[in-house]
Amino acid sequence: MRIERHPILDIPENREKVTIYVNGEPIEAVKGEVVAAALLAAGYKTFRKTPKYHRPRGIFCAIGRCTDCALTINGVPNVRSCVTPVEDGMQIMIQDGLGTWE
Ligand code: FES
């Protein structure tokens, strides 16, 4: 689910696509968008689980302040996906707890 037309913003029709991998599954993303936008467009709502009670967390502030959108990206835990642009071939893991370095 993406915004394809907007009354004010100009959204180009032929945006360049890249492939990223979420828990090993490939999903299509648009070059230049943030990881959180790509995951939301693919239907993901849970981005991490809390360390103590494993409660789901997802997008909350969307400006890089709350860390609810933290994921493990390319082996680095606790990366805020709402302010991280996608890169082709990016490996993303939904994070359970504090995450670990690979
Ligand atoms: S949603 Fe708050 S830091 Fe990303």
Image (spheres, rainbow, N blue to C red):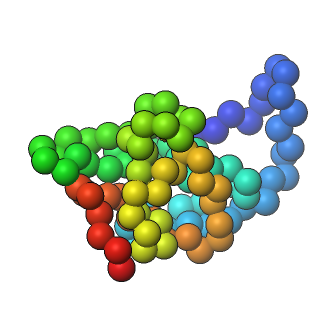
* Residue 94 location, quadrant: bottom left
Question: Hey, which residue is sitting farthest bottom in the picture?
Answer: 102
Q: How many marks?
A: 0
Question: Hey, which residue is sitting farthest left in the picture?
Answer: 53
> Image check: 12 left or right of 42?
right
> Image check: 73 left or right of 19?
left
> Image check: 65 left or right of 49?
right
The location of residue 9, given as percent across then percent down, is: 83, 28
**Residue 66 against residue 26 in the figure, above or below:** above
Q: Is residue 17 visible?
A: yes
In depth, the one of 16 and 78 nearer the eye is: 78
In depth, the one of 89 and 80 nearer the eye is: 80
Question: Hey, which residue is sitting farthest top in the picture?
Answer: 7
The location of residue 97, given as percent across then percent down, is: 23, 55
Q: Which residue is located at x 48 percent, y 73 percent?
A: 74
The location of residue 33, given as percent across then percent down, is: 68, 50
The location of residue 92, given as percent across then percent down, is: 45, 65
Q: Which residue is located at x 68 percent, y 33 percent?
A: 3
* Residue 58 location, quadrant: top left
Question: Hey, which residue is sitting farthest front in the picture?
Answer: 65
For the C terminus, the quadrant is bottom left
Q: Which residue is located at x 42 percent, y 36 percent?
A: 66
**Residue 73 against residue 4 in the figure, above or below:** below
Q: Is residue 41 visible?
A: no
